[in-house]
Image: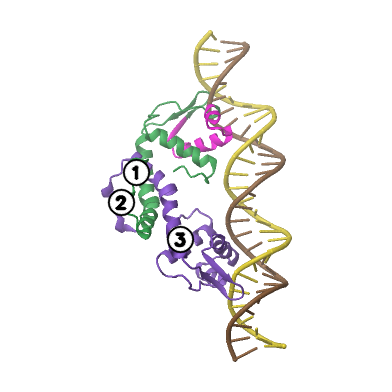
Chain colours: A green, B purple, C yellow, D brown
Amino acid sequence: MADESKPVYLRLREIIAASILDGEFSDGDLLPSVRAFAATQGANPLTVAKAYQSFQDDGLVVVKRGVGMFVADGATRRLREAERERFLDSVWPPVAAQIKRLGIRLDDLDLAKA
Amino acid sequence: MADESKPVYLRLREIIAASILDGEFSDGDLLPSVRAFAATQGANPLTVAKAYQSFQDDGLVVVKRGVGMFVADGATRRLREAERERFLDSVWPPVAAQIKRLGIRLDDLDLAKA
DNA sequence: CATAGTGCATCAGTGCCATAATACAGCCAT
DNA sequence: ATGGCTGTATTATGGCACTGATGCACTATG
């Protein structure tokens, strides 16, 4: 969901979520520091902090002050379920409607194109 | 694409585009006036005007000052092609990526749910 | 000409987003 | 203990998009 028009902190949030879902970071793993991640993404550290903040609010990330941010226990599973529900409820229906409206056939939709 | 978080004028634009693609308005038809459409949608007339504006810029709508806005010649076809290209280029790839990432099977995606 | 319906231009207000510069609080290896 | 790394809080600023109220120019109709 790399929509170029979205706010930066939301894009960063999606990048982090994708990394976790793809297994790049597992439960208990130490996430990149705010400053380090900001550097690699060319973003402001405070903007990164804002992205991390939303994960804390959901309890998906645990902060050890002075050490770093860790993926919470069971976060991978909970994140996957939350994202799945959000996708099926909010993302897919309008997409399906557009597919139908535009008369797009499933042959045109290559699932490997991702 | 009724994303509740999007700006109003973009949602209105999508409503209009869908109406045209669904054949509710054909080439040459008179579109609802800015004020009338604003009333039915509970929006501000200026916001509606901004939505219509984007169609004018694309030449999909022709303005007769003092009369109203008409669907341009060939607009239905051009709109369908533009929307199709936009969908395949910008919308579908991230959606497909998310489907793959979340391990969603095609059985869960009911195309009739639209 | 008078009226009522069009779209449109102008100006202003509001809120979110991103950035910045510091400073502070906690942990850890040396 | 000290230096260096964590995240956090504060305040301020600039930019931009969205929304809104008012009034004007235009056209069809009678």
What stretch of residues is rendered in magenta?
A: A36-62
- Under mark 2, the amino acid is Leu
Foreground pick, D21 / D17: D17
Nearest to viewer (mark 1 / mark 2): 2
Residue sitting at 40 percent across and 68 percent down? B23
C-alpha separation, residue under disc 3 versus residue under disc 2 = 22 Å
Residue sitting at 45 percent across and 35 percent down? A16
Q: On screen, B65 above or below A80?
A: below
Q: Are marks 1 and 2 on the same chain?
A: no
C-alpha separation, residue under disc 1 versus residue under disc 2 = 14 Å
| Residue for badge 3 | B78
Q: Position of residue A25 (x, y in %)?
A: 40, 29
Mark 3 surroundings: few (<14), some (14-19) or many (≥20) residues within 10 A: some
- Under mark 1, the amino acid is Ile
Residue B27, visible in the rendered structure: yes
Main SS category, magenta section:
helix
Host chain of mark 2? A
| Residue for badge 2 | A106
Host chain of mark 3? B
Host chain of mark 1? B
Q: On screen, A52 above or below A108?
A: above
Residue sitting at 48 percent across and 38 percent down? A13
Q: Is residue A51 magenta?
A: yes
Residue sitting at 40 percent across and 52 percent down? A90
Q: Does B90 sit left or right of B104 as displayed? A: right
